[in-house]
Image (tube, rainbow, N blue to C red):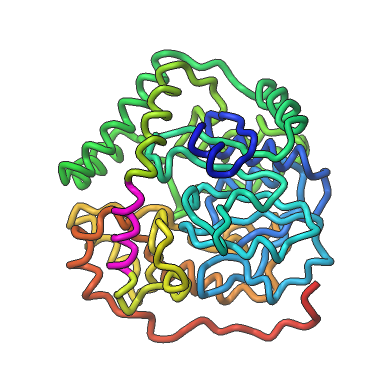
Amino acid sequence: MKHIEERTGRHCLSLPSNRLGLYLALRHWCLPGQRLLMSPISADEILFLVLAAGLRPVIAPLSPRNGNIDVSRVDLDTVDAVLTTNLYGLPDDAPAFAGKILIEDVAHAMESDLDGRPLGTFGHASVFSLSKHPGAGSGGVLAVEHESDLRALTRARDDLLTRGSLRADLWSVATSMARQAALRLDLVRPALRLMRSLGMQEEREGYRIALRAGELELALKQVPSLPPFDPWVRADLHDYRAHRGALVRWYQRRRVARVPRDRARRVAGVRRLAELPTVAPAVLDDLSRPLFRVPLLVRDRDAAIEELERHGVSTGYLYDPAYDDYAPAFTEHSPDPAPARWWARHVLPVDPMCTARSLPVLRRLEPPTSGPITDPLPGPRG
């Protein structure tokens, strides 16, 4: 995509999803058995992609300021690689991971900078999502520094692609356009009811998809291989590695072209939400960032979600519980899981493009009665 190429100055590979790009990057730069440091708070499928690549997920302590990796409490000498999250567009401390294999997940952070440098330009590879800021419904972009890596990753992508269809492409574009229309016309509540009645949302246990540990153990016997993990990775996007035709590519280009034009409106929403006493502290570090979502930390998060839906605002992008509690048998636990548990229980991500509709509810919300309890960690940072 031209916008991402110009922003990062890197070679870009178009993909049917951000998910496929993350797997390709992990397989290209990491070896099976290596230890990958990652945040305890991220999407379900990210954990399964790491497992599919044959890597050992090492869960990092979380910073309650921003929901990302707390680098000050990590011994980097004990890991081989790092996967950043840049949660809701708030940047991980990418420069602190210099010397490690660094893969940047910038799905939430297409427009975020760190000290004036765009996210997606720090690591060996960065993976963008076209379904987040652009709202294209699907699509991803893998950005790399060297053309030789691009050629190898193109071959690897083609090996994993499944056959697409015009019918699937039409459905993808139509559903994305319907979501955009529902937002404009204040039809979010009926749209959500329709999606649930048609089974368009994956069944979940709370906010996470079912782990199915026994089946997952069988898939792990085939690593490194992605297809055995399809039942987990494809959640809410079953065509995540299907070839996309000209119609979808045209629609994606059209949606990405809107991102710079929407920047001022998004920043204005961030600044209004930043005035709330419940806003996460790191949001105040730089109010010029056009965040994908503004994280608030509130006392009764689930009740707030229900109230927002009654006002036509859908929340989404909740990663609760943290990986330590979601998949304890498949991860190396964080030395201090308490901050991640606290964050997962209290965070309320709010779309800054829907500020006017959400503020009547948000102004009534109160911060949690207590902050996270953090245990001292032994040993120096590597």
| Pick the front one: 230 or 107 | 107
Question: Which x, y percent locates residue 284?
Answer: 42, 73
**Residue appearing at x 66%, y 26% in the figure:** 157
Vertical relation: 357 (above or below) 362 = above
Magenta region, mostly helix, strand or loop? Answer: helix
**Residue appearing at x 22%, y 61% in the figure:** 358
Question: Which x, y percent locates residue 210?
Answer: 52, 48
Vertical relation: 179 (above or below) 118 = above
* Camera sees residue 360: yes
Tell whether 18 sits left or right of 171. Answer: right
Can residue 276 be found in the magenta stretch?
A: no
Question: Which x, y percent locates residue 364?
Answer: 22, 75
Residue 194, image quadrant: top left
Which range of residues does the magenta coloring cover?
262-273
| Pick the front one: 95 or 359 | 95
Tell whether 113 sits left or right of 188. Answer: right
**Residue appearing at x 75%, y 28% in the figure:** 152
* Camera sees residue 41: no
Can residue 266 be found in the magenta stretch?
A: yes
Vertical relation: 82 (above or below) 75 = above
Tell whether 373 sits left or right of 273. Answer: right
Q: Where does the C terminus fall, quadrant-wise?
A: bottom right
Q: Tell how many labels.
A: 0
Question: Which x, y percent locates residue 236?
Answer: 45, 38
